[in-house]
Image (cartoon, helix red, strand yellow):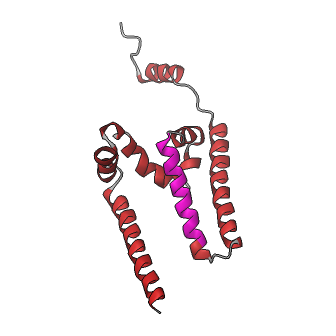
Amino acid sequence: MNPIETKKDYQDYVNKKSPNSPILKNCFNAFWVGGLICTIGQVIFSYCKFRGMDTQMSNTIVSVLLIGISAFLTGLNLFNRIGKFAGAGSLVPITGFANSIVSPAMEYKSEGYVMGVGGKMFTVAGPVLVFGISASIIVGIVYLIFNTSAITLV
């Protein structure tokens, strides 16, 4: 005789086996970790403004640093621990963007950094995002080279 015969029996079985999620605790952790990430971004922004940079340059530096830090922490497998603790609090800010690109590629680290991580970034993490980032870096370098040479010629 099967102990799970009806939908109610099954639901009772599931409720007994699955742990209750501490919703308020999870929300609080997501709130303060997401707030901490945003506060770090604001501190970087304020420092850039203090050093005399304009708003656009300060915003760019904040974005690049937060993406770089979260990609680095993902590579060290620390960001996944933060994500497990904070949930959406770590994923909603821009740091979740870097994590979503780096973490799938890190699974292929055993195949090597070029063919494993580098190759899988294009197939797993989304070709559009990786191409957009790569193209913007190349355009920025070309712009920097030509803009610097135009200044030195004058």
Q: In the image, what residue occupies the spot 47% across and 24% down?
A: 11
Closest to the observer, 115 or 151:
151
x and y, in percent, of residue 23 in the image: 62, 38
Q: Is residue 97 left or right of residue 35?
A: left
Q: Is residue 109 left or right of residue 69?
A: left
Residue 94 in view in this figure:
no
Q: Residue furthest front?
A: 153
x and y, in percent, of residue 15 in the image: 52, 24
Magenta segment includes 65? yes
Q: Is residue 97 left or right of residue 44?
A: left
x and y, in percent, of residue 21 in the image: 59, 32
Specify the quadrant of the image occupied by residue 113: top left
Q: In the image, what residue occupies the spot 69% across and 67% down?
A: 46
The prevailing secondary structure element of the residues shown in magenta is: helix
Q: Which region is colored magenta?
A: 58-76
Quick check: 150 above or below 29? below
Position of the N terminus by quadrant: top left
Q: Residue furthest bottom?
A: 154
Closest to the observer, 127 or 75:
75
Specify the quadrant of the image occupied by residue 24: top right
